Image (cartoon, rainbow, N blue to C red):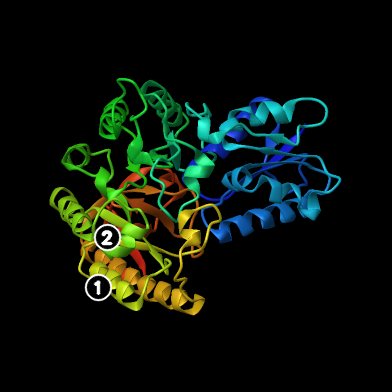
Amino acid sequence: MHSVQIITLGCKVNQYESASFRTGFEKAGWTAGGEHPADLIVINTCAVTAKAGAQSRQAIRQALRHSPEARLIVTGCYAEAAAATIADMPELADRSFTIVGNSDKHLLVQTALQDGDLPERLMGDIMAATEITRLPVGRFGARTRAFLRVQDGCDSYCSYCIVPFTRGPSRSLPADEVVRQAAIFAAAGHKEIVVTGIHLGYYGRDLVGGPPLPGLLDRLSAALPEIRFRISSLEPIEIDERLLELVAARPNLMPHLHIPLQSGDDEILSRMNRRYTVARFAKVIALCRQYLPDAAIGIDVLAGFPGETEAHFTRTRSFLEGLDWTYLHVFPYSDRPGTEAATFRGKVAKQDKSRRVAELMALGEQKKLAFYRRQLGRRLPILVETQRTGDGLLRGFTDNYVPVVIAGEDALMDTIVMVELQHLENTILRGEVCQG
């Protein structure tokens, strides 16, 4: 029996695509995973930052040390952006390998299964892609929640971002196919589905007569009322009253939004080619709180963008201090060759970027703990994970994305239970299962 090791870096879309690869190999009788050296290694790479590119190269080296005789397939955004760099790696000299572009991921499994030597490259023109690749998934591994990719590509071209060049134009999966895949996940036992895409808010724009994202969520949540649906990331200009009214009305649409900000200064936002102002962002957060007062709201911020002065950074920090949000993802800016921002002057020194990141992360911890404290005493449903903590407790997430630990039997794993949130210990909420 042949074996394959699938290594995934980066976003939820990559994780969905890797789950599809696994489904295809297992249907062909292969085993996926395991501790022994594999016959084939598939590495699904990421290129969103310079660090992600370096991690992708490191993953190739480590996998080949683990399975020195294996054939190798490298795919994903770093493969799309840096195919020549990968091909020139010394570790790949005199070795069979294939680089598969993002527009050809649907051909990856059948290519790997063919007899004889693999082609060195299988790469179409990602910028000419007009349809989303069909990548069905049987089950999303052993996870309690599954990721459902409904959209690929991006047309925004933020000045710092390489993703539009590695993922191509926005393409959407027709709603009928989305609902079918969600039903497959439900039948496989997944209790929660995260609806995701490269630029999720663009969903439906390329479909003739297709619904926009709120229409898709309306259909999904009505078709599968027993499944919890969580929305991944949405741009602030894509959040409106129709969406928020729907989330507030449907108990199986989780009160959880992730909204990238990137900077709290209008001048920097303009240089980033972001299409909103800080005033518009603040109105969106206020609207979210109007409809979803207890929702978790996550925010992304990019620190040290070229030209970001101390005054710009101070305005960003002050702006964030005045908003009602839950958690913060902070990233230091890094040049991506091929993007507009890579040519900008005014690079921020590494030590200044590190300090700004640290300050924002500290603010994020303060806001998160304040949100957690507001949850004490509430009774909320949690989806219990299938692994215990190091000290033997069960863990899970509330509908509004608060991590909770509880005492309980294994029978509670992979079920949704009502829990009263009782104590906050350091950064962990402890709860007790409600009886009756």
Towards the viewer: 282 or 147: 282
Q: Amino acid at mark 1?
A: Ser
Q: Position of residue 68 (x, y in %)?
A: 82, 49
Look at discs 1 and 2 and give the one toward the viewer. Answer: 1
Horizontal side of 346 relative to 123 (left or right) equals left
Dot 2 crowding, Cα within 10 Å, few <14, some 14–19, many 20+: many
- Looking at the image, which is closer to me, 110 or 131? 131
Left or right placement of residue 334 versus residue 313 in this view: right
Question: How many angstroms separate mark 1 from mark 2 (CA)?
Answer: 31 Å
Q: Are marks 1 and 2 in contact (CB under 8 Å)?
A: no
Residue 307, label in figure: none
> Split into 4 quadrants, where in the image is the N terminus?
top right
Is disc 1 surrounded by few (<14), some (14 to 19) or many (20+) residues within 10 Å? few
Residue 414 horizontal/vertical position (percent): 43, 43
The residue located at (76%, 33%) in the rendering is 2
- Residue nearer the viewer, 324 or 33: 324
Disc 1 marks which residue?
318
Q: Residue at x 49, y 79 (%)?
A: 351
Q: Is residue 285 above or below residue 428?
A: above
Q: Is residue 67 left or right of residue 382?
A: right
Q: Secondary structure at mark 1?
A: helix
Task: Say above or below: 380 vs 321.
Answer: above
Numbered circles on residues, count: 2
Amino acid at the residue labelled 2: Leu
Residue at 56% in and 55% down: 337
Secondary structure under the numbered disc 2 in the rendered image: strand
Residue at (73%, 56%) from the top-left corner?
A: 62
Give the label on residue 421, or none. Answer: 2
| Outermost right residue | 94
Q: Earlier in the sequence, mark 1 or mark 2?
A: 1
Q: Position of residue 301 (x, y in %)?
A: 37, 62
